[in-house]
Image (cartoon, helix red, strand yellow):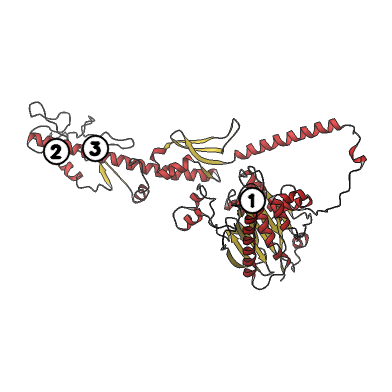
Amino acid sequence: MSLSLRFAAGSHKGMIREGNEDSGYAGPRLLAVADGMGGQAAGEVASSEVISALVQLDDDIPGSDLLTALGRSVQRANEQLRVMVEDDSQLEGMGTTLTALLWTGQRLGLVHVGDSRAYLLRDGSLSQITQDHTWVQRLVDEGRITEEEAGTHPQRSLLMRALDGRGQVEPDLSIREVRAGDRYLICSDGLSGVVSHQTLEETLAGYRGPQETVQELIQLALRGGGPDNITCIVADVLDTDDGDTLAGRLSDAPVVVGAVAENQHAIADQRAMQTPAGRASELGRNVPPPAPAPEGAFGPPGSGGHDLQQGSFGAYAGADLGKPRRKGRWFKNTALIVLALGVVGGGLYGGWRWTQTQYYVGTEDDHVAVYRGVDQDLAWISLSQIHEDRPDIELKYLPNYQRKQVRETIAVNSLAEADAKVGALLKQAAVCEKVVLIDQQREQEAKEREKEKDAAGSTGRPAQPGSSPSAGGTGTGTGGGAVVGENPAAPAAMSFSLRSLLPASLTVPMATATPSPGITTAPDAGGTGKPGGSDGADGKAAADPAPSLSLSPEEQKLAQQCDTGRQ
Protein backbone atom coordinates (compact mmCIF):
# COMPACT_ATOMS: atom_id res chain seq x y z
CA MET A 1 0.00 0.00 0.00
CA SER A 2 1.38 3.36 -1.08
CA LEU A 3 0.02 6.36 0.78
CA SER A 4 0.21 10.00 -0.25
CA LEU A 5 -1.16 13.37 0.84
CA ARG A 6 -3.60 15.40 -1.25
CA PHE A 7 -4.22 18.87 0.13
CA ALA A 8 -5.58 22.38 -0.30
CA ALA A 9 -4.87 25.59 1.61
CA GLY A 10 -6.59 28.95 1.92
CA SER A 11 -6.27 32.21 3.82
CA HIS A 12 -8.43 35.31 4.32
CA LYS A 13 -7.79 38.47 6.31
CA GLY A 14 -11.30 38.32 7.83
CA MET A 15 -13.90 41.05 8.22
CA ILE A 16 -12.15 43.29 10.76
CA ARG A 17 -8.36 43.10 10.40
CA GLU A 18 -6.69 45.48 7.94
CA GLY A 19 -4.02 42.98 6.91
CA ASN A 20 -3.27 39.26 7.03
CA GLU A 21 -0.66 38.18 9.60
CA ASP A 22 -1.27 34.44 9.03
CA SER A 23 1.03 32.37 6.82
CA GLY A 24 0.52 28.86 5.51
CA TYR A 25 2.35 26.28 3.41
CA ALA A 26 1.10 22.97 2.02
CA GLY A 27 3.40 20.62 0.11
CA PRO A 28 3.78 16.90 -0.55
CA ARG A 29 5.61 16.37 2.77
CA LEU A 30 5.04 19.53 4.85
CA LEU A 31 1.83 21.18 6.09
CA ALA A 32 2.27 24.28 8.28
CA VAL A 33 0.21 27.21 9.62
CA ALA A 34 1.66 30.19 11.53
CA ASP A 35 -0.46 32.92 13.14
CA GLY A 36 1.63 36.08 13.53
CA MET A 37 1.15 38.69 16.24
CA GLY A 38 2.67 42.04 17.07
CA GLY A 39 0.70 44.50 14.96
CA GLN A 40 1.64 46.56 11.92
CA ALA A 41 4.11 44.57 9.79
CA ALA A 42 5.71 42.65 12.67
CA GLY A 43 3.13 39.84 12.85
CA GLU A 44 3.37 39.00 9.18
CA VAL A 45 7.17 39.16 9.37
CA ALA A 46 7.27 36.57 12.17
CA SER A 47 4.85 34.13 10.49
CA SER A 48 6.57 34.51 7.10
CA GLU A 49 10.01 33.91 8.60
CA VAL A 50 8.97 30.76 10.46
CA ILE A 51 7.24 29.26 7.43
CA SER A 52 10.29 30.10 5.27
CA ALA A 53 12.56 28.35 7.79
CA LEU A 54 10.48 25.15 7.66
CA VAL A 55 9.99 24.99 3.88
CA GLN A 56 13.34 23.22 3.36
CA LEU A 57 11.85 20.17 5.13
CA ASP A 58 9.54 19.72 2.14
CA ASP A 59 12.49 19.54 -0.27
CA ASP A 60 14.46 16.90 1.62
CA ILE A 61 13.24 13.37 2.16
CA PRO A 62 12.77 13.16 5.95
CA GLY A 63 15.02 10.74 7.76
CA SER A 64 14.06 8.27 10.45
CA ASP A 65 14.10 10.92 13.18
CA LEU A 66 11.21 13.18 12.28
CA LEU A 67 11.04 14.93 15.64
CA THR A 68 14.70 15.90 15.59
CA ALA A 69 14.32 17.49 12.16
CA LEU A 70 11.23 19.40 13.24
CA GLY A 71 12.74 20.50 16.55
CA ARG A 72 15.93 21.82 14.93
CA SER A 73 13.97 23.77 12.30
CA VAL A 74 11.81 25.39 14.96
CA GLN A 75 14.84 26.38 17.03
CA ARG A 76 16.54 27.86 13.94
CA ALA A 77 13.41 29.86 13.14
CA ASN A 78 13.20 31.15 16.71
CA GLU A 79 16.86 32.15 16.64
CA GLN A 80 16.35 33.98 13.36
CA LEU A 81 13.52 35.99 14.94
CA ARG A 82 15.92 37.00 17.72
CA VAL A 83 18.49 38.21 15.18
CA MET A 84 15.87 40.17 13.26
CA VAL A 85 14.69 41.96 16.42
CA GLU A 86 18.30 42.87 17.28
CA ASP A 87 18.80 44.30 13.79
CA ASP A 88 15.52 46.22 13.72
CA SER A 89 14.05 47.53 16.98
CA GLN A 90 10.72 48.18 15.25
CA LEU A 91 10.15 44.42 15.27
CA GLU A 92 10.32 44.24 19.08
CA GLY A 93 7.33 42.32 20.45
CA MET A 94 6.58 40.31 17.32
CA GLY A 95 5.89 36.59 17.54
CA THR A 96 3.95 33.76 15.96
CA THR A 97 2.30 30.44 16.64
CA LEU A 98 3.19 27.33 14.64
CA THR A 99 1.44 24.04 13.95
CA ALA A 100 3.05 21.77 11.35
CA LEU A 101 2.89 18.16 10.12
CA LEU A 102 5.88 16.46 8.41
CA TRP A 103 5.08 13.40 6.26
CA THR A 104 7.31 10.38 5.55
CA GLY A 105 4.84 8.19 3.66
CA GLN A 106 3.71 6.10 6.65
CA ARG A 107 3.97 8.46 9.61
CA LEU A 108 3.45 12.11 10.48
CA GLY A 109 5.61 14.17 12.80
CA LEU A 110 3.71 16.94 14.63
CA VAL A 111 5.20 20.14 16.05
CA HIS A 112 3.02 22.68 17.88
CA VAL A 113 3.49 26.02 19.67
CA GLY A 114 0.67 28.44 20.57
CA ASP A 115 -3.08 28.30 19.88
CA SER A 116 -3.24 27.29 16.23
CA ARG A 117 -4.72 23.80 16.04
CA ALA A 118 -4.49 20.45 14.26
CA TYR A 119 -7.46 18.07 14.00
CA LEU A 120 -7.84 14.49 12.80
CA LEU A 121 -11.05 13.17 11.23
CA ARG A 122 -11.03 9.37 11.39
CA ASP A 123 -14.07 7.13 10.83
CA GLY A 124 -16.32 10.20 10.85
CA SER A 125 -15.19 11.41 14.30
CA LEU A 126 -13.18 14.62 14.71
CA SER A 127 -10.57 14.94 17.47
CA GLN A 128 -8.20 17.79 18.32
CA ILE A 129 -4.63 16.45 18.33
CA THR A 130 -2.96 19.59 19.71
CA GLN A 131 -3.42 21.40 23.01
CA ASP A 132 -3.65 25.18 23.15
CA HIS A 133 -0.80 26.91 24.97
CA THR A 134 -3.09 29.57 26.44
CA TRP A 135 -3.94 30.86 29.90
CA VAL A 136 -7.58 29.76 29.71
CA GLN A 137 -6.57 26.22 28.64
CA ARG A 138 -4.43 26.02 31.75
CA LEU A 139 -7.46 27.10 33.82
CA VAL A 140 -9.53 24.37 32.13
CA ASP A 141 -6.84 21.74 32.78
CA GLU A 142 -6.78 22.74 36.44
CA GLY A 143 -10.57 22.49 36.66
CA ARG A 144 -11.01 26.18 37.52
CA ILE A 145 -13.29 26.93 34.56
CA THR A 146 -15.28 24.84 32.08
CA GLU A 147 -14.75 24.52 28.33
CA GLU A 148 -17.89 26.61 27.81
CA GLU A 149 -16.58 29.39 30.06
CA ALA A 150 -13.20 29.28 28.27
CA GLY A 151 -14.92 30.18 24.99
CA THR A 152 -16.07 33.55 26.39
CA HIS A 153 -13.21 34.26 28.80
CA PRO A 154 -11.79 37.78 28.32
CA GLN A 155 -8.20 36.42 28.36
CA ARG A 156 -8.78 33.52 25.96
CA SER A 157 -6.16 34.92 23.53
CA LEU A 158 -3.37 35.19 26.10
CA LEU A 159 -0.58 32.85 24.93
CA MET A 160 1.72 31.00 27.32
CA ARG A 161 4.08 29.85 24.54
CA ALA A 162 5.02 31.34 21.16
CA LEU A 163 7.97 31.76 18.80
CA ASP A 164 9.26 35.25 19.60
CA GLY A 165 13.07 34.93 19.73
CA ARG A 166 13.19 35.74 23.44
CA GLY A 167 14.58 32.43 24.64
CA GLN A 168 14.61 28.70 24.15
CA VAL A 169 11.21 27.58 22.91
CA GLU A 170 9.65 24.28 24.04
CA PRO A 171 7.37 22.99 21.27
CA ASP A 172 5.10 19.95 21.62
CA LEU A 173 6.49 17.13 19.45
CA SER A 174 4.78 13.81 18.67
CA ILE A 175 4.57 11.03 16.08
CA ARG A 176 1.25 9.92 14.56
CA GLU A 177 0.53 6.75 12.65
CA VAL A 178 -1.64 7.32 9.59
CA ARG A 179 -4.33 5.36 7.80
CA ALA A 180 -5.82 5.61 4.35
CA GLY A 181 -8.95 7.72 4.65
CA ASP A 182 -7.63 9.99 7.41
CA ARG A 183 -8.34 13.69 6.96
CA TYR A 184 -6.26 16.36 8.72
CA LEU A 185 -7.15 19.99 9.36
CA ILE A 186 -4.58 22.61 10.43
CA CYS A 187 -5.94 26.08 11.13
CA SER A 188 -5.40 29.37 12.93
CA ASP A 189 -7.74 30.46 15.72
CA GLY A 190 -9.56 32.68 13.22
CA LEU A 191 -11.37 29.44 12.25
CA SER A 192 -11.37 27.33 15.43
CA GLY A 193 -12.32 30.29 17.62
CA VAL A 194 -15.42 31.08 15.54
CA VAL A 195 -16.72 27.77 14.15
CA SER A 196 -17.83 25.17 16.70
CA HIS A 197 -16.26 21.71 16.97
CA GLN A 198 -19.52 20.09 15.84
CA THR A 199 -19.75 22.25 12.72
CA LEU A 200 -16.10 21.52 11.87
CA GLU A 201 -16.79 17.80 12.20
CA GLU A 202 -19.90 17.94 10.01
CA THR A 203 -18.11 19.98 7.33
CA LEU A 204 -15.01 17.78 7.20
CA ALA A 205 -17.09 14.59 7.28
CA GLY A 206 -18.88 15.71 4.11
CA TYR A 207 -15.81 14.38 2.31
CA ARG A 208 -15.92 16.85 -0.50
CA GLY A 209 -12.60 17.63 -2.13
CA PRO A 210 -9.95 19.44 -0.07
CA GLN A 211 -10.37 22.70 -2.01
CA GLU A 212 -14.17 22.78 -1.66
CA THR A 213 -13.84 21.97 2.05
CA VAL A 214 -11.31 24.77 2.60
CA GLN A 215 -13.62 27.23 0.87
CA GLU A 216 -16.60 26.18 2.96
CA LEU A 217 -14.64 26.43 6.22
CA ILE A 218 -13.47 29.97 5.43
CA GLN A 219 -17.01 31.00 4.50
CA LEU A 220 -18.30 29.59 7.81
CA ALA A 221 -15.75 31.71 9.70
CA LEU A 222 -16.70 34.81 7.70
CA ARG A 223 -20.40 34.24 8.39
CA GLY A 224 -19.48 34.01 12.06
CA GLY A 225 -18.18 37.57 11.92
CA GLY A 226 -14.59 36.94 10.74
CA PRO A 227 -13.03 38.77 13.71
CA ASP A 228 -9.51 37.48 12.96
CA ASN A 229 -7.35 36.29 10.07
CA ILE A 230 -8.50 32.87 8.82
CA THR A 231 -6.04 30.27 7.50
CA CYS A 232 -6.60 26.53 7.11
CA ILE A 233 -5.17 23.46 5.36
CA VAL A 234 -7.15 20.29 4.63
CA ALA A 235 -5.15 17.16 3.72
CA ASP A 236 -6.39 13.66 2.89
CA VAL A 237 -4.35 10.46 3.21
CA LEU A 238 -5.04 8.46 0.03
CA ASP A 239 -3.96 5.03 -1.16
CA THR A 240 -2.51 5.54 -4.65
CA ASP A 241 -2.35 1.77 -5.32
CA ASP A 242 -6.09 1.06 -5.19
CA GLY A 243 -6.94 3.00 -8.34
CA ASP A 244 -8.52 5.92 -6.46
CA THR A 245 -9.53 8.38 -9.18
CA LEU A 246 -9.49 11.26 -6.69
CA ALA A 247 -5.83 10.58 -5.89
CA GLY A 248 -5.03 10.85 -9.58
CA ARG A 249 -6.96 14.08 -10.12
CA LEU A 250 -5.56 16.07 -7.20
CA SER A 251 -2.37 18.04 -7.66
CA ASP A 252 0.55 17.80 -5.24
CA ALA A 253 2.05 21.17 -6.27
CA PRO A 254 3.08 23.23 -3.19
CA VAL A 255 0.72 26.00 -2.12
CA VAL A 256 1.74 29.14 -0.20
CA VAL A 257 -1.02 31.30 1.35
CA GLY A 258 -1.40 34.34 3.57
CA ALA A 259 1.31 36.84 4.43
CA VAL A 260 4.22 34.73 3.19
CA ALA A 261 2.58 34.44 -0.25
CA GLU A 262 1.79 38.16 -0.49
CA ASN A 263 5.32 39.03 0.58
CA GLN A 264 6.75 36.85 -2.18
CA HIS A 265 5.05 39.09 -4.73
CA ALA A 266 6.83 42.07 -3.24
CA ILE A 267 10.16 40.61 -4.36
CA ALA A 268 9.54 41.98 -7.86
CA ASP A 269 9.50 45.51 -6.42
CA GLN A 270 12.90 46.28 -4.91
CA ARG A 271 11.36 49.13 -2.92
CA ALA A 272 9.61 46.52 -0.81
CA MET A 273 13.00 45.47 0.51
CA GLN A 274 12.98 48.66 2.58
CA THR A 275 10.13 47.29 4.73
CA PRO A 276 10.24 44.55 7.40
CA ALA A 277 7.73 42.50 5.40
CA GLY A 278 9.92 42.77 2.32
CA ARG A 279 12.98 41.53 4.19
CA ALA A 280 10.98 38.59 5.53
CA SER A 281 9.79 37.68 2.04
CA GLU A 282 13.40 37.63 0.82
CA LEU A 283 14.13 34.92 3.37
CA GLY A 284 11.63 32.67 1.63
CA ARG A 285 12.81 33.41 -1.93
CA ASN A 286 14.04 29.83 -2.42
CA VAL A 287 10.53 28.41 -1.97
CA PRO A 288 9.49 26.77 -5.25
CA PRO A 289 6.87 29.02 -6.89
CA PRO A 290 3.55 27.14 -6.67
CA ALA A 291 1.71 26.47 -9.89
CA PRO A 292 -1.85 27.82 -10.10
CA ALA A 293 -3.40 24.39 -9.56
CA PRO A 294 -7.21 24.22 -9.35
CA GLU A 295 -7.05 22.26 -6.10
CA GLY A 296 -4.50 24.55 -4.51
CA ALA A 297 -5.43 28.02 -3.54
CA PHE A 298 -8.34 29.94 -2.17
CA GLY A 299 -8.47 33.39 -0.67
CA PRO A 300 -7.57 36.96 -1.58
CA PRO A 301 -5.51 37.78 -4.65
CA GLY A 302 -1.99 36.52 -4.21
CA SER A 303 -2.84 33.98 -1.53
CA GLY A 304 -2.22 31.04 -3.83
CA GLY A 305 1.05 32.24 -5.31
CA HIS A 306 2.05 33.10 -8.89
CA ASP A 307 5.04 32.37 -11.05
CA LEU A 308 6.84 35.73 -11.00
CA GLN A 309 8.82 36.51 -14.13
CA GLN A 310 11.22 39.22 -13.06
CA GLY A 311 12.71 41.39 -15.76
CA SER A 312 10.18 40.27 -18.38
CA PHE A 313 8.40 43.62 -18.58
CA GLY A 314 9.63 45.86 -21.42
CA ALA A 315 9.50 49.64 -21.59
CA TYR A 316 6.23 51.36 -22.44
CA ALA A 317 5.75 52.12 -26.11
CA GLY A 318 3.87 55.13 -27.45
CA ALA A 319 0.95 52.96 -28.47
CA ASP A 320 0.51 51.85 -24.89
CA LEU A 321 -0.17 55.43 -23.78
CA GLY A 322 -2.73 56.34 -26.44
CA LYS A 323 -5.43 53.66 -26.51
CA PRO A 324 -8.49 54.52 -28.67
CA ARG A 325 -11.80 55.23 -26.96
CA ARG A 326 -14.17 52.32 -27.27
CA LYS A 327 -17.85 52.59 -28.18
CA GLY A 328 -20.36 51.55 -25.56
CA ARG A 329 -17.98 52.24 -22.71
CA TRP A 330 -20.55 54.32 -20.83
CA PHE A 331 -23.11 51.54 -21.05
CA LYS A 332 -20.57 48.98 -19.91
CA ASN A 333 -19.53 51.07 -16.90
CA THR A 334 -23.13 51.66 -15.92
CA ALA A 335 -23.88 47.95 -16.17
CA LEU A 336 -20.88 47.16 -14.01
CA ILE A 337 -22.00 49.68 -11.37
CA VAL A 338 -25.52 48.25 -11.33
CA LEU A 339 -24.12 44.73 -11.10
CA ALA A 340 -21.84 45.73 -8.23
CA LEU A 341 -24.73 47.35 -6.36
CA GLY A 342 -26.81 44.25 -6.92
CA VAL A 343 -24.04 42.01 -5.58
CA VAL A 344 -23.57 44.23 -2.53
CA GLY A 345 -27.32 44.41 -1.90
CA GLY A 346 -27.70 40.68 -2.34
CA GLY A 347 -24.80 40.07 0.01
CA LEU A 348 -26.29 42.33 2.66
CA TYR A 349 -29.67 40.66 2.33
CA GLY A 350 -28.11 37.20 2.47
CA GLY A 351 -26.13 38.22 5.55
CA TRP A 352 -29.28 39.51 7.25
CA ARG A 353 -31.15 36.31 6.44
CA TRP A 354 -28.31 34.30 7.94
CA THR A 355 -28.42 36.34 11.16
CA GLN A 356 -32.08 35.35 11.54
CA THR A 357 -31.03 31.72 11.87
CA GLN A 358 -28.82 32.50 14.87
CA TYR A 359 -29.87 32.61 18.54
CA TYR A 360 -28.39 33.75 21.83
CA VAL A 361 -29.48 34.16 25.46
CA GLY A 362 -29.38 37.68 26.87
CA THR A 363 -31.23 40.12 29.11
CA GLU A 364 -34.34 42.24 28.75
CA ASP A 365 -34.58 44.80 31.56
CA ASP A 366 -34.15 42.73 34.74
CA HIS A 367 -34.89 39.26 33.39
CA VAL A 368 -33.76 36.68 30.81
CA ALA A 369 -34.79 36.57 27.15
CA VAL A 370 -33.93 34.47 24.09
CA TYR A 371 -32.91 36.55 21.06
CA ARG A 372 -32.92 35.66 17.38
CA GLY A 373 -30.07 37.18 15.37
CA VAL A 374 -26.61 38.35 16.39
CA ASP A 375 -25.74 40.77 19.18
CA GLN A 376 -24.59 43.55 16.87
CA ASP A 377 -25.98 46.68 15.26
CA LEU A 378 -25.42 47.73 11.66
CA ALA A 379 -25.54 51.53 11.75
CA TRP A 380 -29.01 52.19 13.20
CA ILE A 381 -30.32 48.71 12.35
CA SER A 382 -30.38 46.10 15.11
CA LEU A 383 -29.49 42.60 13.91
CA SER A 384 -31.41 40.86 16.70
CA GLN A 385 -34.87 40.79 18.21
CA ILE A 386 -36.52 39.01 21.14
CA HIS A 387 -37.66 35.52 20.19
CA GLU A 388 -38.95 34.52 23.64
CA ASP A 389 -39.25 36.77 26.67
CA ARG A 390 -38.78 35.00 30.03
CA PRO A 391 -39.85 37.39 32.82
CA ASP A 392 -40.14 34.36 35.12
CA ILE A 393 -36.31 34.17 35.24
CA GLU A 394 -35.27 37.29 37.15
CA LEU A 395 -31.57 38.18 37.13
CA LYS A 396 -31.56 38.94 40.85
CA TYR A 397 -32.19 35.25 41.61
CA LEU A 398 -29.28 33.97 39.48
CA PRO A 399 -25.78 33.43 40.93
CA ASN A 400 -23.30 36.19 40.13
CA TYR A 401 -21.37 34.21 37.52
CA GLN A 402 -24.55 33.24 35.62
CA ARG A 403 -25.87 36.79 35.86
CA LYS A 404 -22.63 38.02 34.29
CA GLN A 405 -22.79 35.41 31.53
CA VAL A 406 -26.34 36.36 30.59
CA ARG A 407 -25.55 40.08 30.57
CA GLU A 408 -22.59 39.43 28.25
CA THR A 409 -24.90 37.14 26.17
CA ILE A 410 -24.54 33.37 25.84
CA ALA A 411 -23.99 32.21 22.27
CA VAL A 412 -25.73 28.96 21.23
CA ASN A 413 -25.69 26.89 18.06
CA SER A 414 -29.43 26.29 17.77
CA LEU A 415 -32.84 27.16 19.22
CA ALA A 416 -32.93 23.78 20.98
CA GLU A 417 -29.65 24.60 22.72
CA ALA A 418 -31.08 27.99 23.72
CA ASP A 419 -34.17 26.32 25.21
CA ALA A 420 -31.96 23.91 27.16
CA LYS A 421 -29.87 26.77 28.51
CA VAL A 422 -32.96 28.73 29.54
CA GLY A 423 -34.35 25.62 31.26
CA ALA A 424 -31.18 25.30 33.33
CA LEU A 425 -31.32 29.00 34.26
CA LEU A 426 -34.99 28.66 35.27
CA LYS A 427 -34.23 25.72 37.55
CA GLN A 428 -31.31 27.57 39.17
CA ALA A 429 -33.35 30.78 39.63
CA ALA A 430 -36.23 28.86 41.22
CA VAL A 431 -33.92 27.25 43.77
CA CYS A 432 -32.23 30.56 44.61
CA GLU A 433 -35.62 32.24 45.03
CA LYS A 434 -36.61 29.44 47.39
CA VAL A 435 -33.42 30.00 49.37
CA VAL A 436 -34.33 33.67 49.70
CA LEU A 437 -37.80 32.75 51.00
CA ILE A 438 -36.28 30.35 53.51
CA ASP A 439 -33.96 33.08 54.76
CA GLN A 440 -36.91 35.46 55.14
CA GLN A 441 -38.90 32.85 57.06
CA ARG A 442 -36.01 32.29 59.45
CA GLU A 443 -35.76 36.00 60.11
CA GLN A 444 -39.54 36.27 60.68
CA GLU A 445 -39.54 33.35 63.09
CA ALA A 446 -36.64 34.85 65.02
CA LYS A 447 -38.58 38.11 65.36
CA GLU A 448 -41.71 36.28 66.56
CA ARG A 449 -39.74 34.39 69.18
CA GLU A 450 -38.15 37.63 70.33
CA LYS A 451 -41.62 39.19 70.72
CA GLU A 452 -42.86 36.17 72.66
CA LYS A 453 -39.82 36.35 74.90
CA ASP A 454 -40.43 40.06 75.57
CA ALA A 455 -44.12 39.39 76.29
CA ALA A 456 -43.22 36.60 78.73
CA GLY A 457 -40.87 38.94 80.56
CA SER A 458 -43.54 41.63 80.99
CA THR A 459 -46.30 39.29 82.33
CA GLY A 460 -44.11 37.07 84.43
CA ARG A 461 -45.12 33.91 82.65
CA PRO A 462 -44.34 32.38 79.27
CA ALA A 463 -46.37 33.71 76.38
CA GLN A 464 -48.14 31.25 74.15
CA PRO A 465 -47.76 31.34 70.38
CA GLY A 466 -50.50 33.28 68.67
CA SER A 467 -51.79 34.89 71.92
CA SER A 468 -52.12 38.58 72.62
CA PRO A 469 -53.05 40.18 75.95
CA SER A 470 -56.49 41.76 76.19
CA ALA A 471 -57.37 44.92 78.05
CA GLY A 472 -58.70 43.03 81.05
CA GLY A 473 -56.19 40.26 81.01
CA THR A 474 -58.79 37.70 79.96
CA GLY A 475 -60.70 36.86 76.82
CA THR A 476 -61.82 34.13 74.55
CA GLY A 477 -61.41 33.47 70.83
CA THR A 478 -64.45 33.57 68.61
CA GLY A 479 -65.24 32.21 65.22
CA GLY A 480 -62.72 29.35 65.50
CA GLY A 481 -59.80 31.55 66.68
CA ALA A 482 -57.24 30.58 69.31
CA VAL A 483 -58.16 31.08 72.98
CA VAL A 484 -56.55 34.21 74.46
CA GLY A 485 -56.07 34.96 78.15
CA GLU A 486 -55.58 32.75 81.19
CA ASN A 487 -56.42 29.49 79.35
CA PRO A 488 -54.29 29.49 76.14
CA ALA A 489 -54.88 26.73 73.60
CA ALA A 490 -52.73 23.72 74.34
CA PRO A 491 -52.49 22.63 70.67
CA ALA A 492 -50.91 25.98 69.78
CA ALA A 493 -48.22 25.54 72.41
CA MET A 494 -47.58 22.01 71.20
CA SER A 495 -47.26 23.23 67.60
CA PHE A 496 -44.62 25.75 68.63
CA SER A 497 -42.53 23.15 70.45
CA LEU A 498 -42.61 20.80 67.44
CA ARG A 499 -41.50 23.52 65.04
CA SER A 500 -38.51 24.31 67.21
CA LEU A 501 -37.27 20.73 66.78
CA LEU A 502 -37.26 20.78 62.94
CA PRO A 503 -33.81 20.99 61.19
CA ALA A 504 -33.30 24.58 60.08
CA SER A 505 -31.12 23.52 57.13
CA LEU A 506 -33.90 21.66 55.33
CA THR A 507 -37.27 22.77 56.69
CA VAL A 508 -38.34 26.20 57.88
CA PRO A 509 -41.86 26.91 59.27
CA MET A 510 -43.94 29.77 57.97
CA ALA A 511 -44.55 31.06 61.51
CA THR A 512 -47.09 33.86 61.41
CA ALA A 513 -45.59 35.72 58.42
CA THR A 514 -47.67 36.51 55.42
CA PRO A 515 -47.34 33.62 52.95
CA SER A 516 -44.93 34.30 50.10
CA PRO A 517 -45.96 33.83 46.47
CA GLY A 518 -46.30 30.18 45.53
CA ILE A 519 -46.82 29.08 49.18
CA THR A 520 -50.29 28.12 50.44
CA THR A 521 -51.61 27.61 53.95
CA ALA A 522 -54.25 25.17 55.12
CA PRO A 523 -57.73 26.72 55.67
CA ASP A 524 -59.19 26.77 59.17
CA ALA A 525 -61.70 24.14 60.09
CA GLY A 526 -64.41 26.67 60.64
CA GLY A 527 -64.03 28.12 57.12
CA THR A 528 -63.58 31.63 58.46
CA GLY A 529 -60.13 32.12 57.03
CA LYS A 530 -58.76 32.92 60.52
CA PRO A 531 -55.60 31.15 61.67
CA GLY A 532 -56.39 28.16 63.86
CA GLY A 533 -60.13 27.37 63.43
CA SER A 534 -62.39 25.62 66.00
CA ASP A 535 -63.14 21.92 65.74
CA GLY A 536 -66.87 22.71 66.03
CA ALA A 537 -67.48 19.90 68.55
CA ASP A 538 -66.17 20.69 72.01
CA GLY A 539 -65.24 24.37 71.44
CA LYS A 540 -61.52 23.74 71.95
CA ALA A 541 -59.01 25.51 69.76
CA ALA A 542 -57.21 23.35 67.18
CA ALA A 543 -54.16 25.03 65.62
CA ASP A 544 -53.08 23.53 62.27
CA PRO A 545 -49.32 23.00 61.88
CA ALA A 546 -47.78 25.81 59.79
CA PRO A 547 -46.71 24.76 56.28
CA SER A 548 -42.99 24.82 55.52
CA LEU A 549 -40.47 24.95 52.66
CA SER A 550 -37.92 22.22 52.07
CA LEU A 551 -35.09 21.54 49.59
CA SER A 552 -34.71 18.24 47.79
CA PRO A 553 -31.18 16.74 47.52
CA GLU A 554 -30.93 18.01 43.93
CA GLU A 555 -32.06 21.49 45.01
CA GLN A 556 -29.52 21.49 47.84
CA LYS A 557 -26.70 21.08 45.26
CA LEU A 558 -28.03 23.98 43.22
CA ALA A 559 -28.51 26.05 46.38
CA GLN A 560 -24.77 25.91 47.05
CA GLN A 561 -24.25 28.17 44.00
CA CYS A 562 -26.79 30.75 45.15
CA ASP A 563 -25.45 34.07 46.36
CA THR A 564 -28.68 36.11 46.01
CA GLY A 565 -29.96 37.57 49.24
CA ARG A 566 -26.54 37.37 50.85
CA GLN A 567 -24.80 40.20 48.99
Residue 123 vs 399, above or below: the answer is below
Mark 3 or mark 2, which has the lower sequence index?
3
- In this view, the mark in front (3 or 1): 1
Q: Say which residue label 2 marks.
A: 453
Which quadrant of the figure has residue 518?
top left
Can residue 353 be seen by looking at this rendering? yes
- As helix, strand or loop, the secondary structure at mark 2 comes to helix
Near mark 3 (Cα within 10 A), the count class, few <14, some 14-19 or many ≥20, is some
- Residue count near mark 1 (Cα–Cα under 10 Å), binned few <14, some 14–19, many ≥20: many
Residue 494: x and y in percent read: 15, 42
User: As drawn, is 277 to the left or to the right of 364?
Assistant: right
Closer to the chain start, of discs 1 and 2, is 1
Residue 541 drawn above or below residue 46: above
Of the 4 image quadrants, the one containing the C terminus is top left
Q: Whole-Å distance between the Cαs marked 1 and 2?
A: 77 Å
- Residue 409 x/y as whole percent: 50, 41
Looking at the rendered structure, the secondary structure element under dot 3 is helix
x, y percentage for residue 190? 61, 49
Marks 3 and 2, how far apart at CA: 14 Å
Q: Relative to 144, is 226 above or below?
A: above
Q: Amino acid at mark 3?
A: Gln
Left-right relation of 434 to 337: left
- As drawn, the label of residue 444 is 3
> Which residue matches tag 1?
42
Label 1 SS: helix
